[in-house]
Image (tube, helix red, strand yellow):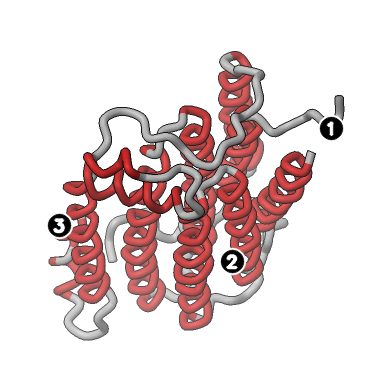
Amino acid sequence: MIETIVFAIAALMILVGAVGVVASSHPVHSALSLVLTLFGVAVQFVALEANFLAAVQVIVYAGAIVVLFLFVIMLLGVARAEDLRTDRLPIQRPLAGVLGLAIVGLLIAAFVASRDTEPLAVGPGLAIAGEAGAGAADVNLADHDANIRQLSFNLFSDNVFVFELTSVLLIVAVAATVVLTRRERSKSAAEAGPVES
Amino acid sequence: MIADVQPTTTWYLILAAVVFGIGAVGVMIRRNPLVMFMCIELMLNAVNLSFVAFAKRLGDIGGQTAVFFVLVVAAAEVVVGLGIIVSILRRRPGATADDLADLKG
């Protein structure tokens, strides 16, 4: 019962925030609605026993990415309301609505058709499936930080090469952004094109 | 009966599908490039939610690892995308997605 209440409140936060992002005429209001959605998703992560990802969601998304959005909005001075009444392409909104409803309808039809109605298993933590690292068997599932241990075992044993590649990606992104937003010598912005792709 | 109801994986997946649809509609109807970026973040979050729901349903931690990588790639994407938007808007203030239809500076 308590899980259902938590799900309903968090889902309401997520949906209100998502509609607010799309329907707000002011970019700052969109960013703040995005924060509401991100916190709702973090609550759902906790309900799904992904405690570490919930913390990372709040820190990285709400703490870093939305703040970056707000910095750009304030620095560029584009924080003015946009007129959402007028529609330059008359067919654009009905077409977008039909396409969005088609996406949602098809996805929900697929989920409902393939659903298994038994409730989620309630347990202390996730079991490690497949062949895990040698030390993974020692992880006590009832431990209070079993989630972060399992995630770290999976991350640094099976996916360690992908993990190293993400560090390369972050270095490339930082270098590309520094080159792109440099004010003088705009020719170097053109040279940054192949770097990020 | 009511007290026995527990959220199943299907609930989370339907919620994720609705959020994904809202984000997709936002990308299609909004013209402010910053708001379009926020709608892309909405879609990424919907996919993250379904990844975690599947991870719990299947008892496999690999779904959460995928979410971890999605977070990293989303951070890099936002950094590069906002850099591009800053450099465009600095040259043409108030540009919308309609004004950027051509590839010329």
The circle drawn on residue B35 is none
| Residue identified by numbered label 1 | B3
Helix, strand or loop status at disc 1: loop
Q: Position of residue B81 (x, y in %)?
A: 36, 62
| Residue identified by numbered label 3 | A194
Comparing A28 with A140, the one in front is A140
Residue drawn at (45%, 49%), measured in percent from left and top?
A: A147
User: Which chain is disc 2 placed on?
Assistant: A
Comparing A55 with A27, the one in front is A55
Q: Tell me, yes or no, whether the two marked residues, 3 and 1, touch with CB atoms within 8 Å.
A: no
- For the N terminus of chain B, which image quadrant? top right
Helix, strand or loop status at disc 3: helix
Residue drawn at (58%, 32%), measured in percent from left and top?
A: B13
Residue drawn at (33%, 73%), measured in percent from left and top?
A: B87
Residue A68 visible within the image:
yes
Q: Is A124 left or right of A112, judged from the image as shown? A: left
Q: Position of residue B85 (x, y in %)?
A: 39, 67
Q: How far apart, in angstroms, are the residues tagged by discs 3 and 1?
A: 57 Å
Comparing B102 with A114, the one in front is A114
Q: Amino acid at mark 2?
A: Ala
User: Which chain is disc 1 placed on?
Assistant: B
The circle drawn on residue A31 is 2
Whether B50 is drawn above or below A13: the answer is above
Residue A89 visible within the image:
no
Circles 3 and 1 on the same chain: no
Q: Is A81 left or right of A179, judged from the image as shown? A: right
Helix, strand or loop status at disc 2: helix
Circles 3 and 2 on the same chain: yes
- For the C terminus of chain B, which image quadrant? bottom left
Q: Which label's residue is closer to the chain start, 3 or 2?
A: 2
Circles 1 and 2 on the same chain: no
